[in-house]
C-alpha cells in the first residue's frame, strides 16, 4: 500500500489492484495470482505424495506466502493427501512434531505422508532448518524423511481459467472506477462481489491466522 499512498499524496489519481500470489493484501479477500499459485501447489502435492507413497516416506513441503499462511492452509485443507500444515501461528516444538509424525505413521502404516509448512517457520522459531529437521526426524523415527521447497515454481504457474476471469474482472472494475472518476481506492474481491476501500482507510495488517481451518483439517 505504501507506494500507492505516496503517489496519491502527490496528487495523482490512484486505482489499486491487488496482484500477489501470497494473498497478503488486506483490502481484498482474494488477490490476482493467488488461485493459480494455489493450483500449482495442489498439483505439486499430488506428485510429491505419489513418490512419498511408493517409498513409504515422509515429505515435508515448504510453500510461499511471506507473512500470510493462506497458500499453505488452503492447499492443505483442500487436499486429502496432506496430514498436517504448520504456519507461523501453530509451530510445534521438535518433540511435539516428532510424536505427531510417529502417531501418523502408526495410523497410516507404510503409506506416504506429506506435511506442508509455510515459509518463515523452519530455522526461525522452534523448528530447525529443513535439512536439519529431515535428518533428525529420520534418525529418531527410523524411516525416510525428505524435504521439498517448491520455491519460485509457485510464481510461474500458468494462470487458471478462474484466475483469468478474476483478473479480467478486476480490470473491468478499474475502468469503471476511472470512468466514474472514483480515484484513490483499492478494489477488492470476496469470491463473488467486487468492492472498494478508500486508500486512506486501508490498513497494513494480517488477514488472520486461519487457526479454525487448521483445526478443522486436523479433526478430519
Image (spheres, rainbow, N blue to C red):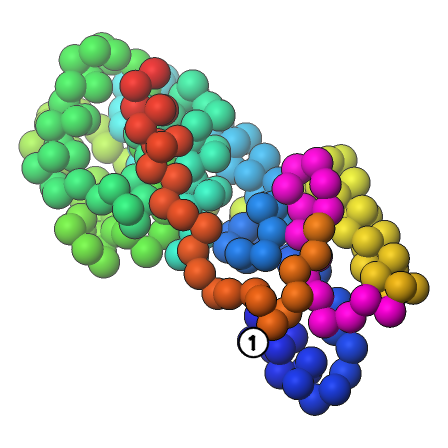
Instruction: Give the quarter of the figure containing the N terminus.
Output: bottom right
- Can residue 32 be seen by looking at this rendering? no
Q: Residues within 10 Å of mark 1 (few under 14, many from 20)?
A: few
Where residue 20 sits, quadrant-wise, is: bottom right
Q: What range of the chain is rendered magenta?
A: 181-194
Residue at point 43%, 55% (across, down): 206
Residue at point 46%, 43% (across, down): 70
Q: Residue 193 lies in magenta, yes or no?
A: yes
Q: Residue 28 lies in magenta, yes or no?
A: no
Q: Nearer the viewer, residue 25 or 19?
A: 25
Image spot of residue 35 (x, y percent): 62, 40
39 up-or-down from 179: above or below: above
Left or right of residue 160: residue 102: left
Q: Nearer the viewer, residue 97 or 51?
A: 97
Residue at point 43%, 19% (across, down): 80
Q: Which residue is mark 1?
A: 2
Image spot of residue 62 (x, y percent): 37, 44
46 up-or-down from 109: above or below: below
Image spot of residue 109 (x, y percent): 22, 10
What number of labels is visible? Answer: 1
Amino acid at each position: 500500500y505504501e507506494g500507492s499512498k505516496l503517489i496519491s499524496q502527490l496528487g495523482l489519481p490512484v486505482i489499486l489492484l491487488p496482484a500477489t500470489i501470497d494473498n497478503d493484501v488486506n483490502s481484498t479477500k482474494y488477490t490476482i495470482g493467488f488461485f493459480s499459485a494455489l493450483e500449482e501447489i495442489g498439483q505439486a502435492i499430488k506428485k510429491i505424495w505419489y513418490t512419498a507413497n511408493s517409498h513409504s516416506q515422509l515429505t515435508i513441503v515448504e510453500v510461499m506466502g511471506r507473512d500470510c499462511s493462506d497458500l499453505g492452509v488452503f492447499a492443505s485443507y483442500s487436499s486429502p493427501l496432506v496430514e498436517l500444515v504448520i504456519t507461523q501461528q501453530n509451530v510445534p516444538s521438535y518433540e511435539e512434531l516428532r510424536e505427531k509424525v510417529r502417531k501418523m505413521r502408526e495410523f497410516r502404516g507404510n503409506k506416504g505422508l506429506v506435511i506442508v509448512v509455510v515459509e518463515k517457520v523452519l530455522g526461525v522459531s522452534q523448528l530447525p532448518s529443513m535439512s536439519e529437521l529431515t535428518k533428525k526426524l529420520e534418525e529418531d523415527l527410523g524411516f525416510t524423511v525428505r524435504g521439498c521447497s517448491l520455491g519460485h515454481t509457485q510464481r510461474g504457474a500458468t494462470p487458471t481459467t478462474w484466475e483469468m476471469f478474476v483478473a479480467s474482472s478486476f480490470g473491468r472494475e478499474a475502468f469503471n472506477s476511472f470512468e466514474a472518476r472514483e480515484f484513490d481506492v483499492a478494489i477488492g474481491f470476496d469470491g463473488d462481489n467486487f468492492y472498494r476501500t478508500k486508500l486512506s482507510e486501508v490498513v497494513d495488517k494480517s488477514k488472520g491466522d486461519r487457526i479454525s481451518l487448521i483445526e478443522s483439517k486436523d479433526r478430519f
